[in-house]
Amino acid sequence: MLVVSCCGEDGGIFTIDSDKVEKVFPYGCSGITRIDDGYIGFSHALQSLLRFNSKFVLKQSQVVGNDFHGVVYYNNELYAVDTYHDRIYKYNLSTLSGIFAWDFAKELACPMCGKSMEDRNDFFHINDLYMFQNWMLMSMFCDRPTANDERNTSGIGKVYVKDLNDQENTFGTYLIVGLIQPHTPFIYGKEFYVCNSKAASIIRGVLKTENGVVALKELREIQIGKGFTRGLWVNDKRIYIGISSSEKRTVDEFKEVQCGVVVLDKKTLKQVSFIPLPASEVYGILEV
């Protein structure tokens, strides 16, 4: 079964079981992650982290702010991206209260005036996380101010890799650069994937870790179609990619695209099916 979170006014949480689509939560959600006894998601409409049981009955909520995105449960720890404030929080799973944050704007200075960039909301647009072997992957649209203090969202998206033990407000090191509004880094075995969202594609590569260094090789771009790609899951046979109708994603040619999930054969990289969803914007995909 797939669990798909969709953001926006017509969003919600959907399950897909043998091509049967069911809406199991009525409010738009961005990040969603599996926990031991259910799920954690973030709802923009409710501005809250939400805890569901395995049947998607809401058991707990905590108001955290207006623009969180990715949510990840890893090694008994819950992490969430406060995109609006350029922070990543660690949360107590029992109380859903924040206990730690990387504040990436805290030490950034404007190249024009030299003042702190802390009052510049959503400068980096950090959106999604992926954790593996005590490393954290972060996808973002931008990583530095330009000379006129404007954020360039057209072609400098990156994925960084950072040691989870590193509490400094720094991103770590580049894993991949030159993406266009990337989302949803994902690792399956030694395979790396990320949505190159505004290019309507995904990037696949081979992950290499040696002497404490994480790097990629054999990168390949796989064109998916004309929709904004966001939300990704990979298993041994299939690749699932979310497709959004992107009227809100500033890409005019994506406005008429059907929202849903593209399913690729992993060996041939050919599309084997498409599952339409009664929403506009896919954000996250889980296989459970």
Image (tube, rainbow, N blue to C red):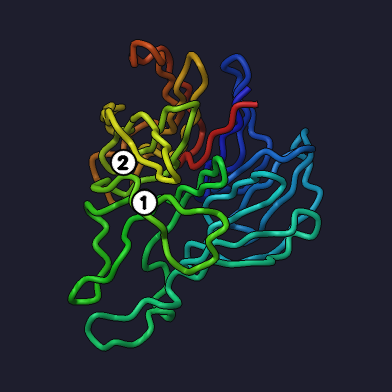
Q: Is residue 7 visible?
A: yes
Among the 4 quarters of the image, the one containing residue 253: top left
**With respect to residue 181, does 18 lie above or below?**
above
For residue 124, side relative to residue 39 (left or right):
left
Q: Is residue 28 visible?
A: no
Q: Residues within 10 Å of mark 2 (few under 14, many from 20)?
A: some
Q: Which residue lies most toward the front here?
A: 211
Viewer-closest of 56 and 221:
221
Give, as a three-letter code, the residue at label 1.
Lys
Residue found 63% across the figure and 42% down from its top: 33
3D distance between C-alphas at marks 2 and 1: 8 Å
- Residue 136, position as x, y percentages in the image: 50, 49
Q: Residues within 10 Å of mark 1 (few under 14, many from 20)?
A: few
Q: At numbered mark 1, what does the secondary structure look like: helix, strand or loop?
A: helix
Q: Which residue is mark 1?
A: 248
Q: Which residue is mark 2?
A: 255
Give, as a three-letter code, the residue at label 2.
Lys
